[in-house]
Image (spheres, coloured by chain):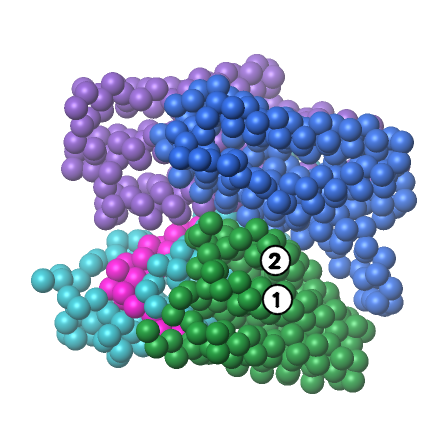
Chain colours: A blue, B purple, C cyan, D green
Amino acid sequence: MDTNRLEAFSDGVFAIAITLLVLEIKVPPSEALGLGLLHLWPSYLAYAISFIVIGAIWINHHAMFDWIVRADHKLLLLNTLHLMFIAFLPFPTAVLAEAFHARSRQDVATAFYAGTLTIIGVLVTAMWWYAASHRELLNDAISPEQAKAIGKRFLIGPTGYGLATILAFVNPWLSIALFITLNAYFLWPRRPQVTS
Amino acid sequence: MDTNRLEAFSDGVFAIAITLLVLEIKVPPSEALGLGLLHLWPSYLAYAISFIVIGAIWINHHAMFDWIVRADHKLLLLNTLHLMFIAFLPFPTAVLAEAFHARSRQDVATAFYAGTLTIIGVLVTAMWWYAASHRELLNDAISPEQAKAIGKRFLIGPTGYGLATILAFVNPWLSIALFITLNAYFLWPRRPQVTS
Amino acid sequence: MDTNRLEAFSDGVFAIAITLLVLEIKVPPSEALGLGLLHLWPSYLAYAISFIVIGAIWINHHAMFDWIVRADHKLLLLNTLHLMFIAFLPFPTAVLAEAFHARSRQDVATAFYAGTLTIIGVLVTAMWWYAASHRELLNDAISPEQAKAIGKRFLIGPTGYGLATILAFVNPWLSIALFITLNAYFLWPRRPQVTS
Amino acid sequence: MDTNRLEAFSDGVFAIAITLLVLEIKVPPSEALGLGLLHLWPSYLAYAISFIVIGAIWINHHAMFDWIVRADHKLLLLNTLHLMFIAFLPFPTAVLAEAFHARSRQDVATAFYAGTLTIIGVLVTAMWWYAASHRELLNDAISPEQAKAIGKRFLIGPTGYGLATILAFVNPWLSIALFITLNAYFLWPRRPQVTS
């Protein structure tokens, strides 16, 4: 089975999840609208972070499926599981916004959010390691060394997000700063020097 | 008419339905957020089950349209009817989560959910039987015996889900266990040994 | 400009509008869940009607764009306007369900629903007449006589729905029966006898 | 990297954002339904404006990606940022409708709406200027003079919307009239006279 269908379906889920995020932002009462709109900053921040997070995962998903050229059923399952947590993201996003809005339990909310990202990171890494250990799924131009190097890079995600999850209980803002930094890093995916 | 359009439209509905599921999960009040998030377990469970159910149906839909290579209007109608119940699934999912949350009428909620899956199973089977009895719609490589064998396998869905619907009134958890088992089975679609 | 992009975008809007319909159905309170689910019949009916209506329009949109092979900007605008009312349909659907649920002002709700369908019908017809009078947009295999014959068939939609809008004030059920009949008719699109 | 994926993903976000707009329109109480539906005119107006705005941006996005034929990572980032504000539009749309409904702070609501459009206009322009200054991303048939001429045209958007944002505090209706006019203008994208 080639990966076109899997990618198109994944793209659909990414595009929908990223667009549903806005539904969590509620219109403030119309008296004092200006102030009301300003007070929604936690919602805007959570929206922007999640949009960039999903955007970054999408871009990396594509880079990964430039290297993975065939899918078997186990990979399909891993991808479905991975999409399950992508599509779940609007919920931790709303939880995060609400906690910062109510100024209450920001630690739990941030940990919940970062925890979801950790699981996504683990599943992305698992997809790569699975594909890398079934070389018939990979692009022929990728050597075993390159596959291993890429795999190491994929470990940054779950490790970083796992750290952010713990850090949330120390200081939620530090945790948020960490996953913004991680995404800034992810948004420049570096392709392997594939020499043909 | 070839099936590309039908498949693309179906994929769209699958991707949207699967992603809308999360909208049914409501943010708990921010005091005692940690506990509130834990208490949402019925919503997470219902989300996960429906995600896997829709994912499994999607994978099988694809397998089916590897075999069905042309569509006539009746097949198009059957497919539309089938999508009508796929797109409906977020509602029984919300009903299921709510009942387990309120610890009230889990039997009715589970039966309603399993009943919707039964109808989907019947429609999927009907699509296959219709295509199998109009051989110009099928891939030439499939022999009548293979078509019949595949058709028998498709009966497992509506039968199993029908049983789960009845079982819900005996014990909702038993019913849920049954449709989780069924999906675990479905997620490994076995292709017919098409010998060319 | 060829029509692939236009069709893909339209398909997206159709698929999303059809899948959003379910969001209008609200979970009943969990005591007396069985009865509550039964009392939702107006929501199920409205859901089913709108699903079939959008499905039928989608199928006919495709048939139309088998004949229309090029798009200019005016056609693009007409199509966008037409999608604006397709994407609007979840709202009259919710209005219809609510009125039948509350047993109050079913006439207004049905007329509002049928009125929306009338506008869609007018815009579909306008798209065809526009394309038919700019023959460079059409498939070469279609003769002017065929284009005219197809155009006449497209008039059935707005006429029938217009009638249903008026009929709603006489008897809402009669109006609903009329647009169910119309859709049963539309769901068997007849292709022109294109002789090459 | 070619632009197919980027365009398909963008189309998905456009199609979803445009279709989510309807979710902001709430069913009026069923007594006095006729009047209730009429009183929703600010919602209909806001819906129509946003639909046309997103439609116009979509059409221009396509025109732009007829000229931009390759994408690098910075362009991908700019496009993601741009989609972030497209997907955000249902929120200012709801704010606008609510303010006109409550007849309160229409100036703030209109400025918020026009401000969002200004940011979108700035990002669209930035995408073009970036591509135009990296000629390997452009279609070879476009001369530097044409690229510059197109770039000037793109300045109309952010300038016009910026003006509308300020104008909102003078008179919200004047501001709305301005962005309706701008969109009427945008909806007729003029292609450059590309002579091969």
Residue at x 48%, y 74% (from the top left corner): D144
Dot 2: what SS? helix
B52 lies above or below B22? above
Pick the front one: A123 or B150 = A123
- Residue A17 in view in this figure: yes
> Which chain is home to disc 2?
D
What's under tag 2, amino acid-wise? Answer: Leu
Residue extending farthest to the front is A195
Residue A172 badge: none
Determine whether, in the image, residue D10 is placed left or right of residue A107. left
Q: Which residue is pictured at 65% across the width and 80% down the height?
A: D160
Same chain letter for marks 2 and 1 = yes
Disc 2 and disc 1 in contact, CB within 8 angstroms? yes
Q: Which mark is residue D126?
A: 1
Q: Mark 1 lies on which chain?
A: D
Q: Distance between the residues labelled 2 and 1?
A: 8 Å
Residue type, label 1 = Ala
Q: Residue at label 2?
A: D78
Decide which of D134, B139 is in the foreground and name it. D134
Label 2: how many residues lie within 10 Å, few (<14), some (14-19) or many (20+)?
some
Residue C54 shown in magenta: yes
Q: What residue sits 31% from the left and 45% below the top? A: B4
Taking the magenta stretch, the answer to whether it contains residue D55 is no
Q: Residue A32: x percent and y percent?
A: 87, 67
Foreground residue among D66 and C9: D66
**Prevalent SS, magenta region:** helix
When asked about the image quadrant of residue B159, the answer is top left
Q: Residue B133 appears at what percent x and percent y? A: 19, 31
Which residues are drawn in magenta?
C50-75
Residues A145 and A184: in front is: A145
Image location of residue A122, percent across then percent down: 63, 26
Of the 4 image quadrants, the one containing the C terminus of chain B is: top left
